Amino acid sequence: MSHDRIAVVDFGGQYAHLIATKLRRLRVLAEILQPEAARSAYQGFRGIVLSGSPSLASRGQDAELDPDLLQLDVPVLGLCFGHQAIARHYGGRVEHEQREYGPAKLRSAAASPLFAGLPAEHTVWMSHGDTVTALPEGFVEIGASVDPDGRVHHNAAIADERRRRYGLQFHPEVDDTEHGLAMLERFAVGICGCTPSWTMDRYLDEQIAALRARVGTEPVLLLVSGGVDSTVCAKLLAEAIGPERLHLLHVDNGLMRQDESRRVLAELGELGIDRHLHFVDATDRFLSALAGVVEPESKRRIIGDTFVQVFEEQAARLGLQGMLLGQGTIYPDTIETGGTRRADVIKTHHNRVPAVERMIAAGRVVEPLRELYKLEVRELGARLGLGEGLLWRHPFPGPGLGVRVLCSDGRAPVSHQPADLTLALDAATRPFGLHGLVLPLRSVGVKADVRSYELPVMLWGESSHAQLLHVAAQIYARVPGINRCTLDLTGTGARRAEPVAATITRERLDLARRADAVVMAALERHGLLRHVWQCPTVLLPLRLDGRGCEVVVLRPVLSERAMTARPAELPLAFTEQIRAPLLGLPGVCGLLLDLSTKPPGTIEWE
């Protein structure tokens, strides 16, 4: 059966693949093409979507947009960078100003089939530094955005209905854009005329057939952490090639949650796929490799390389040299590691370190979930018969506590708290009765599809959750060098914060495990495990007002695919219940709640 198709042109944005995924959820087949694809590659497509990009159209970095593409007689929708590139191509002006990160309100300015039946004002998700400041001839503004400070940003949505050209500054493909899926449906089905005929059930059948063809008669050795991705991958491989040819290797890297390995081994046995289940405790190996390391990308690469070394050694020990390596890699792992040619490296995932990339190039890696997001993995797992307890377990990063225990050489970042930064922070917080302190360490974030490695802010004072998020959004827009905001859950604040020299040690990992266990148990008691999508517990090596050596951060988020995230509001009873146990842990001098959206703060701090 043939399907109507939409082409998604990937300019390297974080969400290019997500656009295609969302279209497929509308049962419209979407295929990703690169900008250098020949014009003939677009034959048969009913419409084109231009993705975002880490490039800046305002600086002429849109040269890769083939002008012939916009001569095709099919509808074209540009998103973020694609929106700006369309405006420039037809003679509009794009300038580097009016940054927006996170939520904004879209206010309709003119009727358009793209917004047919949608409310006149609703929430959209922004991540940009460039802005369309003058429209080309033939285009009209169909929507303006209003930021949390009440400022209006014009040309957030533009259209030339005669030529069927549309541009959206925001990202309709992310889950946090309130009516984003409806907008994509109005473009693909309404404007492009596609007939919805693609199904997810068909995807499962095609994956099983593809795996059988790819693997042939070879066995597969799958690294299985016990998280939902690797567990679903194990079940899918067992269905495709049979449990007798599937070897499972669980590695305790010393960076796992409390009692994690024992539970993982038991659950794999219950699934009936443990015919060849192997276990190795490589704690000493990993901790030795991480000794003295501070920089987050170095930590991630070391952890990934050590996994590969352990895999190779175990394969040799079992007489399985040359066996295919199986991984439960999902799409966010790939794109955040700069997995497409134009994408920026946000953070290197352990399953995308150079050693693994070399194995992929040699054809030795099998990754059946690499095109999916967490939500789709859970749907696939349900079709494969996995229970809710496994499917809805909170995500845990492959590098584990290695990226939740932050490290420091004891020196404050060079840019820490210059006078102008402090004044800008005061201007953003004091009108709301809040106080702020810049913390002297960096964390990883993402701004306009580019990695940021910037400073967090600690806030304190009486305020509602909504007002705190409003202030945080102002800080991201007005204060340079900040990508994360936190709330002091003690309510006392601090006059100064100093970095403490600290690396990965058994003692710090044990402290992080104890803190994580307190938080996870409280989430379960309060019935929040399904409401909160993920809640990393993070250790910061900081001294507050001369006290202690560790600050604990809670990072509860709401998300579906991890490409965007909103901070979850926790009940007062929850925070009151965990405050004393966490502050009572050895060396802990502070307790913070992360208020950051993604963007600009990634879900994990490193």
Image (tube, rainbow, N blue to C red):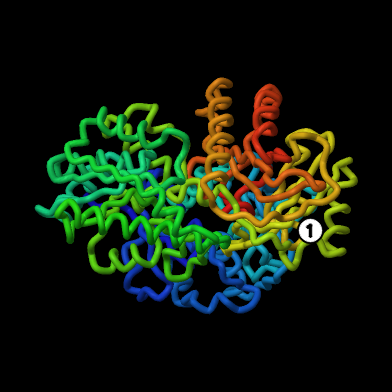
Q: Position of residue 503 (x, y in %)?
A: 58, 55
On screen, residue 507 versus residue 439, left or right, reads left
Q: Is residue 373 above or below residue 274?
A: below
Q: Quadrant of residue 69?
A: bottom left
On screen, residue 91 versus residue 247, left or right, reads right
Please identify the residue farthest to the left as the structure is shown.
Answer: 217
The foreground one among 301 and 126 is 301
Q: Is residue 516 above or below residue 41?
A: above
Q: Position of residue 395 (x, y in %)?
A: 46, 40
Q: Position of residue 409 (x, y in %)?
A: 65, 61
Please tell me whether mark 1 sits on a helix, a strand or a loop: helix
The foreground one among 103 and 255 is 255
On screen, residue 434 versus residue 282, left or right, reads right
Q: Residue at x 60, y 67 (%)?
A: 84
Q: Residue at x 57, y 48 (%)?
A: 405
Q: Residue at x 68, y 31 (%)?
A: 584
In what quadrant of the picture does the C terminus appear? bottom right
Q: Residue at x 89, y 46 (%)?
A: 430
Residue bearing the label numbered 1: 478
Q: Position of residue 37 (x, y in %)?
A: 37, 73
Dot 1, crowdedness within 10 Å: few (<14), some or many (≥20)? Answer: some
